[in-house]
Image (cartoon, coloured by chain):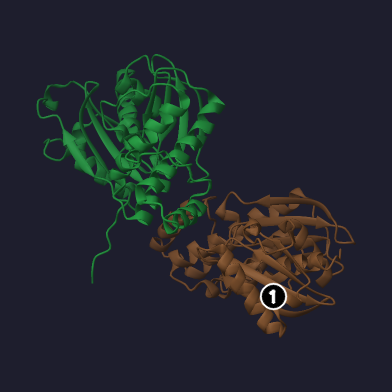
Chain colours: A green, B brown
Amino acid sequence: MEEKKEFWRWKEYNWHDENKDWKEASIVTAGVDVGSVSSQAVIMADGELYAFSNMRTGSSSPDSAQKAIDWAMENTSLTLDNIRFTVGTGYGRVNVPFAKKAITEIACHARGGNYMYGPTIRTILDMGGQDCKAIHCDERGKVTNFLMNDKCAAGTGRGMEVFADLLSIPIEQIGEMSLSVEKEPEPVSSTCVVFAKSEAMGLLRSGWDKNTVLAAYCSAMAHRIVTLLERIGVEEDFAITGGIAKNVGVVKRLEKEIGIKILEPKYDTQIAGALGAALFAKTLVEKGKG
Amino acid sequence: MITAGIDMGAKTIKVVILKDGEIIGKSIVIGGLDQKKSAEEAVEKAVAEAGITRDQIEKMVATGAGRGEVDFADSDITEVGADAKGAIKLYPSARTVIDVGAEEGRGIRIDSAGKVVDFSINEKCAAGAGSFTESMARALEVPLEELGPLSLKSTQEVPMNAQCAVFAESEVVTMVHNKIPKEDMARAVHDAIASRITSMVRKVGFEKDVVLIGGLAHNVGFVKSLEKDLETEVMIPEQPEFVGALGAAIAASGGA
């Protein structure tokens, strides 16, 4: 039997900085973000990014947290004992067995965004697997206001995964493919992902090619996010974190619709939460709480 | 006088033919890519069942989400109006009509003449419509028509945190992993839809008697959850999916 291809699967990987030696650092901290769809572990040496992992969340949060940190430590000679303080964040943050503290993902994304994009960042849009948050923060990465949708799959990574499967297109190619259309189609009109699926099937049957349907869906998703952003307002600099930040089809359309430049990411956008958590861990150690 | 009503639903097309207020023919077909063609097919089937010819139909009224597709109908009415007309014909004591179709849920309050007093619609979210049961039946690997009876066997209430049909699918995967019995998950799904529908119906301020129509009225599990939530019994016609088409046929005959 032919194995069913999982088009929604995105690349899971780990990384560490081979030019650095964690043993030279005085404080090694970690942040683990157990999200509803993906989990990341970030290890920092004296407040500098040293290693991370990015993987799919399994059915058990503690196991996912453990796997993520083990994978981040792979080939680094680090063990959990070398990590001074770990902060858990994300949907499963209270289920990180080796974390000494749990901090909300809102706070962590703001802090991580501040590290990734610098102190001029004022608005961070985190587009996660099962939620979407618009966060305002100050020059130190402290949250000043936020809005979130975690009730509905429209405008989340899960919605995009559903479309990847429906159209049999690897999720990482959706953005580029959606931009290859000559003429921008009308956005998919249904808000609900379930209804958008039937609408897309109808469009395909009526002769639309896959790229055009993807364009219509990316455009609908961008539009959905705009309505969330409009409620809180966008202050520049503006950046996107989370998995959808990697989808240029959504990012470019969003940028066009709001008329504000979205900063280019320098790091994997999915690690922002775990990065923020690891930074909080360092602060806690410095404050003598570790 | 012979009239016909055609209900162009999101998933199926229903036709009812009336002769002097009595149903003489009806049909249901799945709406295909060409809605107009499917509509023609539905009319032909109903005409055949009634044992009449198509030109004997004096007037035809269309309703449903796709009612604009039927250019052979003489006029059209809203789903809310059609539901009200059909429900009051079957149950003169009806004051609230709840219609749960594949992609839409409606709560309608009517007066003793079947006139619409107030209504509320959900057409935006699958979590309050029949599609939700379809995706859950797939996730639980249970045939759709068995989902209702299965949930009646449930012995415990399992909370469903997800308010979204897509998120609920992932939640079910976790529940399966945690060895939650299928019957309890089926019940959780019906409870979730019922709770959505109940809050929608409460918005219009429901009064007894309550009539439940639309395809989901066939699902005994949903009916049980809904009756529990509303704290009242609901009346269900024998063929709940035809009430909208019936209402349209009544409108075609000039009836209230």
B98 or B45: nearer the eye? Answer: B45
Q: Quadrant of the C terminus of chain B?
A: bottom right
Q: Is residue B70 left or right of residue A191?
A: right
Mark 1 secondary-structure assignment: loop
Identify the image quadrant of residue A283. Answer: top left
In percent of the image, x 50 and y 41: which residue is there? A150
B22 or A38: nearer the eye? Answer: B22
Q: Quadrant of the N terminus of chain B?
A: bottom right
B211 or A111: nearer the eye? Answer: B211
Q: Is residue B106 left or right of residue A57?
A: right
Identify the image quadrant of residue A76. Answer: top left
Residue A166: horizontal and vertical position, in percent? 38, 56
Residue A29: horizontal and vertical position, in percent? 25, 28
In percent of the image, x 81 and y 68: which residue is there? B250
Residue sitting farthest toward the front: B55
Tally the marks: 1
In percent of the image, x 41 and y 55: which residue is there? A207
Residue sitting farthest toward the bottom: B51
- Mark 1 lies on residue: B239
When the figure is inspected, residue A288 is found, relative to residue B214, above or below; the finding is: above
Residue A169: horizontal and vertical position, in percent? 31, 51
When the figure is inspected, residue B113 is found, relative to residue B154, above or below; the finding is: above
Residue A91: horizontal and vertical position, in percent? 42, 41
Identify the image quadrant of residue A30. Answer: top left
When the figure is inspected, residue B140 is found, relative to residue A62, above or below; the finding is: below
A31 or B133: nearer the eye? Answer: B133
